[in-house]
Amino acid sequence: MTEQEIKEAAKRAADEKLFCRLLCKFEYEPRFILPLKASEGLFLSAIESGMSFDGYLVERFQNVDSLKALEPEQSELARRKGLFDSLDVPQLETGSLQQIFAYLVTESECVYLELGSPDSREISFETGLCVDCSDTGLRIVRFDTGMRRDRSATFIPYSSVVRLVFGTRSLKARKKYLSNNT
């Protein structure tokens, strides 16, 4: 698919509330998502997980290989079960990563970040609490699976952010743990 076809598919799926199969470059397994909002370069989706939602994905259009709407019956079933009624769409702008991270800093969100270059398979991962952002990047306090966190914030340039995930059950639990153990 061309980038323009992918953008049109994302817009249609968001307008019609259609689940999609997302396959990104350099990946072998698809993700199942519900596109919510899009700008020229980025789009926000709810992550589908067993007929429920588990967090949000922000993806760059340039990283997407294909985005195809699933059969409309799947979205209709979700509609009848009230899944869309319970969806809390974040009130963020998708025009730039700076706008997205400004929202995440305001909400004190924990994030999973995939870092690297869209032209390379070499990706690293970071998990942390968003604490600040600027014109060029964001600052997170990193923590590991054992909830050990760095003493100071790490600067990450927007240019190295390949994708980000926030609002998952796992990240909410980590945020709660961090809040209770400050």
Image: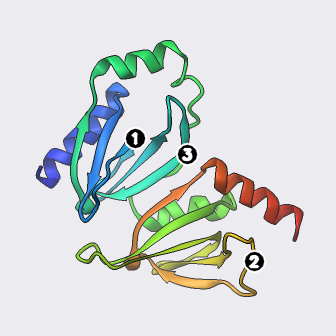
> Dot 2: what SS?
loop
Instruction: Decide: few, some or many residues near mark 2? Use Cα within 10 Å; few <14, some 14-19, many ≥20.
Output: few
Per the image, the residue denoted by label 2 is 148
> Where is 68 relative to 124, above or below?
above
- Tell me, for residue 91, which label it has, or none: 3
The image position of residue 59, as x and y in percent, is: 37, 57
Q: Given contact means CB atoms under 8 Å apart, are the residues at marks 2 and 1 in contact?
A: no
Amino acid type indicated by mark 2: Arg
Per the image, the residue denoted by label 1 is 33
| Of labels 2 and 1, the one closer to you | 2
Frontmost residue, 27 versus 172: 27
Left or right relative to 64: residue 32? right
Q: Quadrant of the C terminus?
A: bottom right
Sequence-earlier tag: 3 or 2? 3
Instruction: Decide: few, some or many residues near mark 1? Use Cα within 10 Å; few <14, some 14-19, many ≥20.
Output: many
Amino acid type indicated by mark 1: Ile
| Of labels 3 and 2, the one closer to you | 2
- Whether residue 61 is visible to the viewer of this picture, yes or no, is yes
C-alpha span from label 1 to label 3: 18 Å
The image position of residue 149, as x and y in percent, is: 73, 79
Frontmost residue, 172 versus 62: 172
C-alpha span from label 2 to label 1: 31 Å
Residue at 58 percent of width and 63 percent of height: 111
Q: Given contact means CB atoms under 8 Å apart, are the residues at marks 3 and 2 in contact?
A: no
Sequence-earlier tag: 1 or 3? 1
C-alpha span from label 3 to label 2: 30 Å
- Tell me, for residue 110, which label it has, or none: none
The image position of residue 180, as x and y in percent, is: 88, 62
